[in-house]
Amino acid sequence: MVQKTNSGKISNLCVDGQALWTDLMETARFGGTAKGGIKRLTLTQEDKQVRDWFMQTCEALGCTVSHDSMGNLFARRAGQDNTLPPISMGSHLDTQPTGGKFDGILGVLGGLSVLRALHKSGYVTRHPIELINWTNEEGSRFSPPMMCSGVFAGVFTEEEVLEKRDRAGIRFGDELDAIGYRGVEKCGEHPLTAYFELHIEQGPILEAEEKTIGIVTGIQGARWYEVTVRGKDAHAGSTPMPLRHDALLASAKMIQTVSAVAVKYGPSAVGTVGLLENRPNSSNVVPGEVFFTIDIRDPDDSVVLKMERELLTQLQQIATDSAVTAEVVQIWDAPAVHFDKECVSMVEQAAAEAQYPARRIVSGPGHDAGYVARVAPTAMIFVPCKVGLSHNEEESITNPQAEAGANVLLEAVLKADQFFNVTE
Amino acid sequence: MVQKTNSGKISNLCVDGQALWTDLMETARFGGTAKGGIKRLTLTQEDKQVRDWFMQTCEALGCTVSHDSMGNLFARRAGQDNTLPPISMGSHLDTQPTGGKFDGILGVLGGLSVLRALHKSGYVTRHPIELINWTNEEGSRFSPPMMCSGVFAGVFTEEEVLEKRDRAGIRFGDELDAIGYRGVEKCGEHPLTAYFELHIEQGPILEAEEKTIGIVTGIQGARWYEVTVRGKDAHAGSTPMPLRHDALLASAKMIQTVSAVAVKYGPSAVGTVGLLENRPNSSNVVPGEVFFTIDIRDPDDSVVLKMERELLTQLQQIATDSAVTAEVVQIWDAPAVHFDKECVSMVEQAAAEAQYPARRIVSGPGHDAGYVARVAPTAMIFVPCKVGLSHNEEESITNPQAEAGANVLLEAVLKADQFFNVTE
């Protein structure tokens, strides 16, 4: 008899770790790089290839597949009562330009291994079980990140996202149509009972403490900005230093300020200038215009706010002192997220029952789960990654780590299946 | 009777200033930009268009046209004794990415107006008179600058120049062939009796002192470097600040150092980082690699050397302190140039005879004349440009200024025609 409380392991089911690893390595071919990583930017041909693979593979496991108006993919396995919103799992299949094989992908393929275990065993859940691939989590090609889980959760509108353009000026909506994944179902009109996301930690803590599982209690707050610094193009040989309006020199000072402000609020705060475009970008021309991005984060929203205030003030001061102008636009504001206590507890118990060394942890990076938490009880499961390296082609985890994460995901999903929508 | 000394105006000839201005505006169409400047990088289709125009226009003025193995163009007007090497004039028709209508172009079209004046008057010189367009003076697309006057003067070899590649990896030799301007005559096997180059000042001095003519006595020394900073790509959200190897942050400190060293040796020294490429250039990735260029100059070669030593030391210190590596390569070393005293004197006298306000001046920027001076007596003539602005689409001079410069060029050429190769 299935227990109605969420204490105690629900089943003896385990995922097939070997098949999971095969899936990871096979899908790494779509956009695979020479260094063993993946360049699979959202809405490119490589993205289409992996989406097609996802849809076919899930259908072969007896799922019904669909996609919404933002290209988010859904693979649903029927339960006893299909009027209930699904217990869901998911993450993202798009990558950074120099991404690894596991960031986001582990959550989707780990969820696939859960579906496979249920399918092969014939186990029937109460709720439907659904695996989700969110469009454009990385925010690399089109800003900001977690864009389509963001629409799902009502943070962004469809209209504004369809109009987003990449640095080459290409429109999001056009690219979604080009790969054939703009669905009829309106994004967001798709209730979920609960949502679990498996992901690599992308930080150094679990590995350092020899933990296998991270019980993720929340996500740190983050803000992104776009800065345009305008000076004046001039001849490098003949323009005296005091008469220059050097946009790159001013930007160099601003880049150091971003770092200094983050260090001031250490050890948890981080600040990064990741993207910079210099114009006209010629060796003997004093640069007249520079565009760059700023990314600041901290688990405490009040710290993020302080960092922002200090940055904005200091950037304008540098601009004035450097005889240039700086236009600063905030393009993303993701407040700190606190996951559902019950779901977090299910993850914690699943890890304990399987005897995986585990610890509670706050996520540094943002995730789709951060937005989904606004519309459904949500939790995340971390596994370690080698020296915490991510957003890097050398990103690396082990087969046993992937398997452990997927097993905790499976058990957490089954606990949730027993816990939610119980009518006494 | 033509006087045999070089005192006193040689002729009553003047250039047609109206036709010169028409030529300037007409050729500005080849690569013309929306802001009124020109983007005509060396060996592009726009460059081919202006070369074709040059050849046709000079032939129509009765010149014999030819080109050498580096694509340098020669338009020769016969003299009394065609066994003598020519008295020559010239400059360059290629531009910066955001160049103006006058940088280099004034020297070529000013020379064209001299040929037109001689042709229309039927005046026969002793020497042949030759107008030259040098390939790739700007050094923007292929580094370093003054590349093909450099081959002409024996500073660079043909082989090394043909192998040069632009930032897209395209080969110089292939592009020269693609526009059809690789000639049979070996570059450099083309003696000149003397060389005069008319050019805009590209600095603020002549305008500020209300001078019409700059009598250029030489060019400041310059050195260029390419720097590759290597750190480690990492996740912007989860990588603690102390564990980063941020190549862009380190480069920002290096950029400030370039400026500081130049300011230290002011007011004459200049230092510029004009080109920078950031990788992987994604908002939420700590940059793992940056490539940038350094340009330092001073009229005193010993100062350039001091600046280089301090820079190299400080760059390595910053790299060490920032947990990155910096590879610094010197790619261009142009020692200070001192022009031929007789030729400079001819320019000075020509300006005085025409009653143009003039003053002696050292050139900030490098010019083809700097290399040609190694193989023939050389001098330059400057005219002012508005607020000294150059390497900028708003670069601006007046019709009277262009005409004055061309008139001084004409008279200097005629004085040289009388002065050199006189056998008593």
Image (spheres, coloured by chain):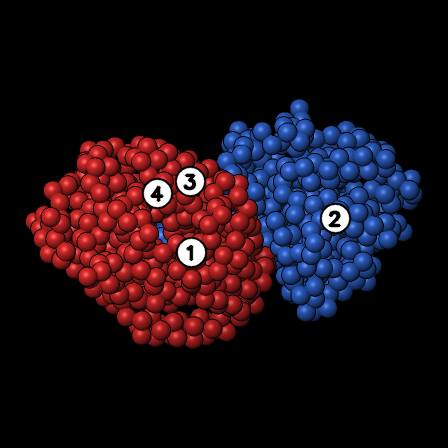
Chain colours: A red, B blue
The single residue placed furthest to the top in the displayed view is B184
Residue A12 lies left or right of residue B210; in this view the side is: left
The residues bearing labels 2 and 4 have C-alpha atoms spaced at a distance of 60 Å
Instruction: Please say if the residues under marks 2 and 4 sit with CB atoms less than 8 Å apart.
Output: no
Chain name for mark 3: A
Q: Earlier in the sequence, mark 1 or mark 3?
A: 3
Badge 2 element? loop
Residue A257 seen in render: yes
Q: Is the same chain shared between marks 1 and 2?
A: no
* Tag 2: amino acid: Ala
Residue labelled with disc 2? B28
Residue labelled with disc 4? A75
Residue B95: image tag: none
Instruction: Please say if the residues under marks 1 and 3 sit with CB atoms less than 8 Å apart.
Output: no
Residue pictured at 59% horizontal, 59% vertical: A234
* Tag 3: amino acid: Asp
Nearest to the eye among marks 1 and 3: give it.
1
Residue A189: image tag: 1
Q: Is the same chain shared between marks 4 and 3?
A: yes
* Image: B418 above or below B298: above
Residue pictured at 43% horizontal, 72% vertical: A312
Chain name for mark 1: A
* Tag 4: amino acid: Ala
